[in-house]
Amino acid sequence: MPRSVPIELLSFRRTFALLMVLVAVPSAGLTGLGVVAILNERAAVEKRLALVWQDRLDTLATRFRQALEASTVTRTDEGLRVIAPSGLLLSGAGFRLSRDVLQSPDTDLVAALTPLRSQLAFLPERPSFLSVPGPTGPVLIVALRAPDGVLGAELTHAGLEQLLGQSGEDLLGKGERVRFGLTPVQPSRPGLVGKFIGGVPGARNALEATPLAERPLPAPLQEFQLRAMPEAGDPVAFASTRNRLVYAGLLGAFYATLVVGVVYTARALYLQARLSRLKTDFVSLVSHELRTPLTSIRMFIETLALGRVKDPEQTQAVLELLQKETERLSAMIERVLDWARLESGRQRYRTERLTARQILDASLDAFRAQRLDSQVQLTCRVQEVLPELEGDREALAGALLNLLHNAYKYSGAEKRIELRADARNGGVDIEVEDHGVGIAKRDRKRVFDRFYRVDNLLTRQTEGSGLGLSISKRIIEAHGGKLTVKSELGKGSTFTIHLPAAKEARA
Ligand code: ADP
């Protein structure tokens, strides 16, 4: 037969499952979203940076053109000489074309210009800057038509790059290490595999660094393009790693909070479910405990009413039994009321100066009044000099009495109890030691919980409500003290009440 599961635990499981679904679904969605964002993040950073740099390259292209046009072009024996407004020499090898003969010290330049000889003849008389394709790559030249032929020069790569550097200096932000360059326009872009490898930080450095942005120059310089090249590291990888770390950190914090929240809620739910189960158990336990003396009382009253007992001695015995049962009944009800008072915070303490001896005497008197001491070997030892205490004598004696009762109840056949009071830790320790069944480690903390009873044979055979220790603990803590237990299963337990000394007594 399947074990029945208590209704409260069932509903706890159901509520917990609901909580998990309500938490897990949106957080899985959120994580998915975060992962997609992270995957697309590099592309987004690249796009953003490209936009910024594209803008800067537009400005640079205009400035570059203006700088070329504002340069000073002078005639030399070889051809032309170009000096930028900043004084920078831009031209390299010159050339001269007269009567269809090209002359230049640079053979590459001659090779590049030879196919264009006929077109060069149509150049205007003022200097023109243009790009021409060549066998070893395009070249940028300056040329003009003069009466004795066409004069010109090649613009050097180094000179042009320097000019770009000067023109674009103020376009760089603080700390940005980017170089502007002039490169031939490449018709082919990196293929899919190249792009893929380029996406992996690190691998990108192993290949050629990828420009942040490129921009072709307008005609007649169309063979060339401007480029913004990162000089140190990969700024995209840097920005994207930083963003990823922030994402990861936020996601981590989100999950940590979620886990703490779920654990905390689950714990609260579980405690609530357990408490409600304990309360149900308590109600059935109390009803059962009340029914037993009530049944006996009813039987005794019936016996007396029907006049079945004639003998006055027997009548006396029945009356005594009646009294004992009613006392048990009232003690039980008293305990429930005590607990209710403590629980609702209605308990008021009458604080007075008192000694440990007075507390011990009051509880021993009550213990004796219940005629329990005759079956017990009880020893009491009180240290002679003890600090004075402060508190409600009746309440403290009641707390101690609960411990004495437990020592009695959970002692089996050998009922040996030692009661001690010693000065310790700036106050008084009152110890109740028994040699009974003891308490297992896992139950040691829980015995102080309301309604908690250790599940063993002796407890099942002993009447009780699981409230005694929780009442005692509350009373002692309300007096600024502590209730602790040391116990060994099968050997016995020692419960210790620690009470602080009264204020002046401490000083
Ligand atoms: P009650 O005695 O009415 O059940 P208590 O709150 O006084 O309730 O005690 C809680 C449980 O702790 C008891 O049911 C018992 O199992 C265990 N216990 C308390 N005192 C002792 C003791 N001296 N030795 C062994 N077990 C104890």
Image (cartoon, grey):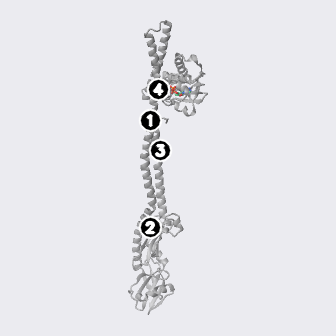
Looking at this view, is 46 or 481 the one in front?
A: 46
Q: Contact, CB < 8 Å: mark 1 with mark 2?
A: no
Indicate the position of residue 408 as horizontal and vertical percent values. 56, 22
Q: Which residue is mark 3?
A: 260
The residue carrying mark 2 is 172
- Is tag 3's residue or tag 1's residue first in the polypeptide sequence? 1
Measure how far apart labels 2 and 4 are at the Cα level: 83 Å
Query: Quick one: SS at disc 4?
Result: helix
**Residue at 54% in and 32% down:** 443
- In the rendered structure, find residue 442 and report the number of the disc placed on it: none
Q: Is residue 3 left or right of residue 382?
A: left
Above or below, 146 relative to 445? below
Q: Residue at x 49, y 61 (%)?
A: 238
Residue 162: horizontal and vertical position, in percent? 47, 75
Q: Earlier in the sequence, mark 4 or mark 1?
A: 1
Residue depth check, mark 1 versus mark 2: number of the one nearer the observer = 1
Graded by Cα atoms within 10 Å as few (under 14), some (14 to 19) or many (20 or more), the crowding at tag 3 reads: few
Q: Amino acid at mark 3?
A: Val
Q: Quadrant of residue 48?
A: bottom left
The residue where tag 1 is placed is 8
Q: Position of residue 353 (x, y in %)?
A: 50, 22
The vertical placement of 171 against 409, above or below, is: below
